[in-house]
Image (cartoon, helix red, strand yellow):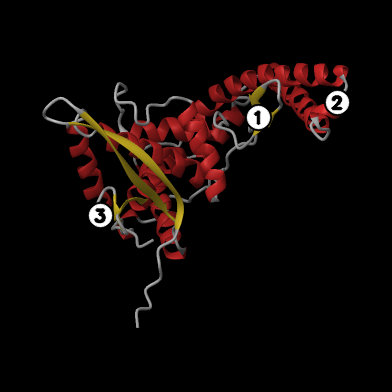
Amino acid sequence: MNNKKKKQWLYEFEAVETIRNEDGSQESKTRYFSIAKPNRRAREEGELFYAAETSRFAKAGVLPKAAWNTILSNGGGAISDLDREGYGTLLMRYRDLAFEVQTSLLKDENERTEVESEKLSEAVLELGVIGREVQAFEADQINIFENTAEAKARNRTILWWVMCLAHEKVKTDYKPVIDAKSFEDKLDLYDDLEEDVDGNNFILNVLKRTMYLITVWYLGRASTNEELAEFDKTFKSEGLGIGTEERQPVSLEAVTEVLGEAVAVGLYPDKKVKTDEVKTDEVKTDEVKTDEVKTDEVKTDEVKTDEVKT
């Protein structure tokens, strides 16, 4: 009797590959990709990898977040009192407007008066303006903390998860997109793909898309198929190059860092404020928390980065 458990999937999507034939003609082929749902053992391996990477970066001289907090607090903080006050005012105004919009949306469109509809449109427009100001402010501040040992370990761990969870469905079977035993071997295979960007443009863009989805999952912004589908829709609507052969993919490590920062500061939000007149993204203003790891207690040579069974 086969007691092997069937692999579960966080999210599945399809991508269309354009194939150029030798005679100059083109044909389209739909390929199917899946993000595996990690089990308890895989999550433990991921946590251990993050801890080991945090320790490795700290030993290499990259300051942990706790050290940066101490430095900034001794120097009066990362921002001035005036900037902090202005930021607080923006947040309070944003929350008041968001409450106003949500209250208005409790009524159906045909139940609102003309005055109520006008106020709703104005509130949503102002939400968009304030949202962009908040995003710009937070992006400036997060740059400081993107150079911590925890942030660099986070980006490295997201890359590790991509290598472990990305699969392609071929008929009834699933195979890893990057098929190798160890993490370093997987990175070597990816480097080989990058050596021929033109020939591997499609799969590199699929990995970029997978990277984004795993980033929002890892940072706790999405955990269900439906939530990931919303993020996938947002990602594609932003025109970030998936399936667009004119756009050349950049280094996967660079994508990890950029997407990690963008999701962290809310540039790709969880939800959107919806009205029939105007659409604007809701800003996620909560600060992303990373675990503080004691670097003297973690030994990097004890961590195994071989392929995880998900």
User: Disc 1 or 3, which lies upstream in sequence?
Assistant: 3
Q: Quick one: 154 or 67, which is closer to the camera? A: 154
- Between disc 1 and disc 2, the foreground one is 2
- Between disc 1 and disc 3, the foreground one is 1
Asked whether disc 1 touches disc 2, contact meaning CB atoms under 8 Å apart, the reply is no
Quarter of the image where the N terminus is located: bottom left
Other residues around mark 1 within 10 Å, as few (<14) / some (14–19) / many (≥20): many
Residue assigned mark 3:
182
How many angstroms separate mark 3 from mark 2 (CA)?
Answer: 60 Å
State the mark number for residue 282. Answer: 1
How many angstroms separate mark 1 from mark 2 (CA)?
Answer: 23 Å
The residue under the point 31% across, 28% down is 250
Residue assigned mark 2:
112
Amino acid type at mark 2: Arg
User: Disc 3 or 2, which lies upstream in sequence?
Assistant: 2
User: Disc 1 or 2, which lies upstream in sequence?
Assistant: 2
Asked whether disc 3 touches disc 2, contact meaning CB atoms under 8 Å apart, the reply is no
The residue under the point 48% across, 25% down is 238
What secondary structure is found at the residue carrying circle 1?
loop
Image quadrant of residue 281? top right
Percent position of residue 255, x then y: 38, 32
How many angstroms separate mark 1 from mark 3 (CA)?
Answer: 40 Å
Residue 45's place in the image compared with 78, above or below, is below
Q: Is residue 263 left or right of residue 181?
A: right
Q: Is residue 64 left or right of residue 122?
A: left
Amino acid type at mark 1: Glu
Amino acid type at mark 3: Ser
Q: Is residue 279 left or right of residue 208?
A: right
